[in-house]
Amino acid sequence: MEKSKVNFDVDVDVCIIGGSIAGNYLACLLAEKNVNCIVIEEHYELGKPFQCAGIISQKILTLLDFPDDIILNRVHIAEIVAPNLVSIKMSGSESPVIIDRVRFDAYFGCKAQGLGVKYYLGEKYLKHWALSKTDVIIKTSKRIIKARMVVGADGPFSKVAAHFNQKNYVIPAVQARFEMKYPIDQTSMYFNPRWKELFGYVVPEKEGSVCRVGLATKNHPNKAFQLFLKKLNLSSVNQIDRQGGALPVGLLAPMVFQNTVLIGDSACMVKATTGGGIIMLVSAAKILAPAISLAISQKNFSHNFLYHHYERKVRKSIGRELKLHYIIRILLEALAPHEFNHFFHLYTTTSLQNVIREYADMDFPLKVIKKLFQEGTFIRYIFYLGFKYYRMIPKVFSILFK
Ligand SMILES: Cc1cc2nc3c(=O)[nH]c(=O)nc-3n(C[C@H](O)[C@H](O)[C@H](O)COP(=O)(O)OP(=O)(O)OC[C@H]3O[C@@H](n4cnc5c(N)ncnc54)[C@H](O)[C@@H]3O)c2cc1C
């Protein structure tokens, strides 16, 4: 087929690839701005398959409007468990919510459809190419689409990003839901060298009787998961169902190209400490929607325009915080079990506890880190780590100044 002469089935301003939270929420924002857009989703049912622990900071309630009954639970205590099973419990002003992730995604998909966005379900994006500065052609498994812009909201293994030779570093995740008695008010994070890229987690869904239990690691995830279940004294008899998934880990990826932008997991908008991505991608969508609307009104889809109105702003806001998450992740991976105990001891016996209680923020750590650097105990601890892990210092600085 000659690329400049193409017969197409649909002509639209924006073609969003991926009908999960990033694609659906962005579609709502664009429809509210009267931008003509469609969503291509390879699955037939929005929200499925379920692949999430569903724990989000309470900021989500100020960022988004959605029905109360999508919230299944709220937790107030975060238990941190060291590799030798010594633990501390932290509580503060954060009261994260546990959501029904399937209904959450579907809610924004239905809302977008109600606002006039057309969804093409069970259809796969295959590739796209530029026809001119203001037009691109998208080929899916079922049709040819002409659009002004393509949005890659197609997750960690983004094909849209791959089109620009961009690939995320991805860690496989395993999760299962269990019938188990567990404090309804508490979530736990188990650190262990076997799954050092993240932590094992227990998140109570409701009434403390069903919990989401999971971990992510490159290193034999299924075997690591079995070991984790053993530590928790859980047997498969109590397993309700099982989910898989993948977490992109690293720094924000480039997210604008001529006529194309990326959002969410496709651009690695994920906290490297927890694997959580929802607050970040919602924040990015709020920047992206007006940028796209402006690009359409000015008929400017160039890399420079999109960089100035989208990527630059995202890097200035969530990008700085995501860098800190990545640095904290590198430090956590390096810590030996006794160093967790050392930190726990400092936490329980010094004023660090008050600072963390007052300023900790599971999404935006900059504020609490600034406050901690006013504490002598913390500065001494960081110096101790700096001496012990001096080889990591250049890496930390290269991340900070990237
Ligand atoms: C086990 C696990 C637990 C997690 N827990 C949390 C948590 O507790 N809190 C939190 O904030 N985050 C959590 N996350 C991360 C969170 O789920 C992601 O950040 C979020 O789902 C990213 O949304 P997205 O829309 O960018 O991508 P995705 O949710 O990955 O959606 C991408 C969509 O694109 C579609 N798609 C992909 N390729 C194509 C194609 N070629 N054509 C058409 N459609 C395509 C997919 O079917 C999918 O619907 C977790 C992730 C995992 C794996």
Image (spheres, helix red, strand yellow):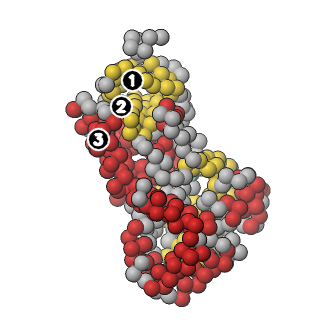
Q: Which amino acid does label 3 sit on?
A: Ala
User: Is disc 2 in contact with disc 1, using a CB cutoff of under 8 Å?
Assistant: yes
Would residue 136 appear left or right of 77 to someone viewing this image? left
Q: Where is residue 232 in the image (x, y as percent from the top left)?
A: 72, 67
Residue designated by label 3:
291
User: Is disc 1 in contact with disc 3, using a CB cutoff of under 8 Å?
Assistant: no
Looking at the rendered structure, the secondary structure element under dot 2 is loop
Residue designated by label 2:
259
Comparing 309 with 207, the one in front is 309
- Sequence-earlier tag: 2 or 3: 2
**Classed neighbour count for the residue bearing mark 1: other residues with Cα under 10 Å, few (<14), some (14–19), many (≥20):** some
Q: Which amino acid does label 1 sit on?
A: Ala
Against 88, residue 298 (above or below) is: above
Gap between marks 2 and 1 measured at Cα = 8 Å
Against 273, residue 128 (above or below) is: above
Q: Tell me if the residue at label 2 has its CB under 8 Å from ligand 1.
A: no
Q: Where is residue 170 in the image (x, y as percent from the top left)?
A: 59, 47
Would residue 398 appear left or right of 314 to someone viewing this image? right
